[in-house]
Amino acid sequence: MKRTLIVAILGFALGGSTAVWKLTSEATPALRTKEVPLLEIVHQNADPLRQFPESFPLQVAVLWTAPIPDQENPLPFVHSLKEMGIPFFITRNLPQALRHRLVILYPSVDLRTFTQFQAEQLTAFVRQGGFIFAQNVFWGGLQNLFGFRAFVPSRKRYRLAFSVTRDPVIKYLNRPEERETQLGSDHFPEIIWSNGYVPDVGAEVLAHFDDGSAALLMNSVGKGKVYLLGLSLLDVVLRNQNNRDYEAQRHYVNAFEPGADVWLLVLRAWYEAYAEDWVRLATIPGGQRSALLLSHDVDWENSFAPGLDFARIEKASQASSTFFIQTKYVDDTNSKAFFFGPNLDTLRQLKAGGSTVGSHSIIHSRGFNKFDLGSGHETYSSYQPRGLGFDTAWGATVFGEVRVSKELLDGEIPGQDTIFFRAGHLRVPVSLPEALERSGYQFDSSFTAADVLSNFPFVLPRDLGFKEDSEIYEFPVTVEDEESPGFAKRVPQALQVILANAENGAVSVVLVHSNESILKAAAEQELLRQLPPDIDKTDMLTFAKFWRARDRLQWSLTATSVSTEAVLQVKSEESVIGLTFEFQRPIATVTGATMSPDNRHLVLPELAPGQSVSLHISYLR
Ligand SMILES: [Zn+2]
């Protein structure tokens, strides 16, 4: 009965004017909604110095060298080090930085950065066994320490290749896609700035640009070493992640593209090579090697029912998935409304069966990236967008698509709190992070991993800029089902990409549209069957909650008076299962955590929000 009524109203709405439709829908609300409060943006991360304070000796010191009026925020290193689970703090104080064994200089060193006396302090630090990772050192006063004779700035270097060397910092770069990366497409006459170095005798070139100049140098000085990069991680990590790059990706989707990840892996290897008795917060829960995050987009009237088949095969394979639902309640030139009746029953069934649910917008427009932000006061009763074609729409806003779809999903599905979003056609407006965080979302999956050259989840900067992180975490799509020749024929290729990511401790996000469940479900089942057992298979929401808690975790490692003992202190803001720490030194015994057979990984028990634990660790030797 109810369905007939809705269809009748929609028919009437199409025939009549918009004003009449609005009156009708206000009088007889066809769908249940739950109010979505409009939140204010909280600028929690305004001061990096206070956000990342010094707390224990193992931390890497990030010395923020930018002059205060035109400071370049250390966001690229915050992203890289946090994603890798490397402990760090940020300081402007050189003596404080030099009390730590590993020091990063960010963003650059020019003739105003250090006094002659400070340059001598830096040199003495390295000579006595300190390790520096710096980018864009221009000052002649530090040429000897960093091992270069000259440098040439340019915006015309398009590729970078790592050398064949035994240097430990590139030990994770074993695949061709990692050995050589692209910095931008040569369709652009100019791309990011780079500084090609002329090495000094004695300095080793670990990577070079396409014009033959050195991109990454290593210089040994006394007991220590310095590494110098002729690029900024702002350009090769952050710029890729917020998709402001000069088309640096070599593929769009369904391929392994680690162009940003290589720098995270270099930092990880640098830390593991030179920190003493290092400890790292692992990227994957439960001591696993990687995770496969399963998702389905439901963006057609007949895509609901096959979802149940996918849920069934996933359950049989000890997996689960997240369904991103297009809440299409209006008719337009692209499709009829389909968010009603039996489709909603199917959704409730999926949710009750253990699948998780996210939003896939309302009108699923390919022009979403050009939509206005909107007011934030869009609601189901007032928001009446219409797609006029694939790319154009009338009356649509970013807030409307994000907020009203949440109102409906939360209203129609018992127990649902929609905090995950995926844009239709993966088109991303720069205002998306703001619309999401102000509507109470936490997670997004609207980019492809190859396009952002990142296979680790990351925080979306506000306005997709360079100054400040939003509260939204991004989980880009690694493998999808629609590119020719179709998912069913690409399972071996998908598996290769998943294994390449697993090697790095990165994750792979799989998107399968639930428009049919014969070929595609069989292919997914085959993929799950061939997945190695140390790759976790889970829905996106469960992993995303883990990642957020991990990203916000506070932890420290304190030595004791006994050289073979240490205390690991952990405090989680949020509930989290399976937090894993990796240790350089093998562990003999620990209380309150599970040790892996290799004696080098500890898996913590479930932590409640706000819970702290102290683990007493005895090393084997
Ligand atoms: Zn879609």
Image (spheres, rainbow, N blue to C red):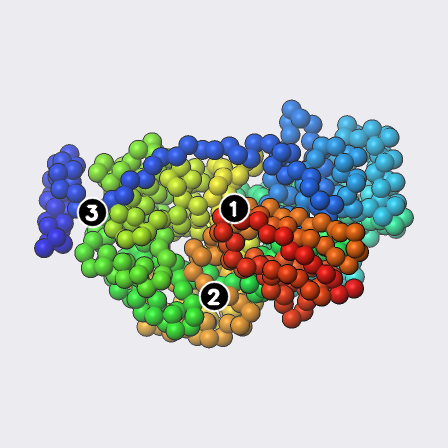
Q: Position of residue 561 (x, y in %)?
A: 79, 51
Three-letter residue code for mark 2? Lys
Few, some or many residues within 10 Å of mark 1 (<14, 14–19, 20+): few
Q: What residue is rendered at 43% in x and 67% in y?
A: 319
Asked if 440 appears above or below 604 in the picture, the reply is above
Q: What residue is rendered at 37% in x and 57% in y?
A: 356
Mark 2: which secondary structure?
Answer: strand
Q: Earlier in the sequence, mark 2 or mark 1?
A: 2
Q: Which residue is mark 3?
A: 31
**Which numbered mark, 1 or 3, is in the foreground of this view?**
1
Q: Which residue is mark 1?
A: 610
Q: Which residue is mark 2?
A: 537
Q: Position of residue 361 (x, y in %)?
A: 33, 47
Which quadrant would residue 265 be assigned to in this image? bottom right
Q: What residue is rendered at 42% in x and 72% in y?
A: 317
Q: What residue is rendered at 59% in x and 52% in y?
A: 613
Asked if 27 appears above or below 313 in the picture, the reply is above
Three-letter residue code for mark 1? Gly
Residue lying at the far top in this picture: please name it: 69
Mark 3: which secondary structure?
Answer: loop
Q: Quadrant of the N terminus?
A: bottom left
Few, some or many residues within 10 Å of mark 3 (<14, 14–19, 20+): some
- Identify the mark at residue 367; answer none if there is no mark: none
Q: Position of residue 492 (x, y in %)?
A: 50, 72
Pick the residue in front: 412 or 511: 412
Q: Quadrant of the C terminus?
A: bottom right
How far apart are labels 1 and 3 at the CA level?
Answer: 38 Å
Q: Are marks 2 and 1 in contact (CB under 8 Å)?
A: no
Mark 1: which secondary structure?
Answer: loop
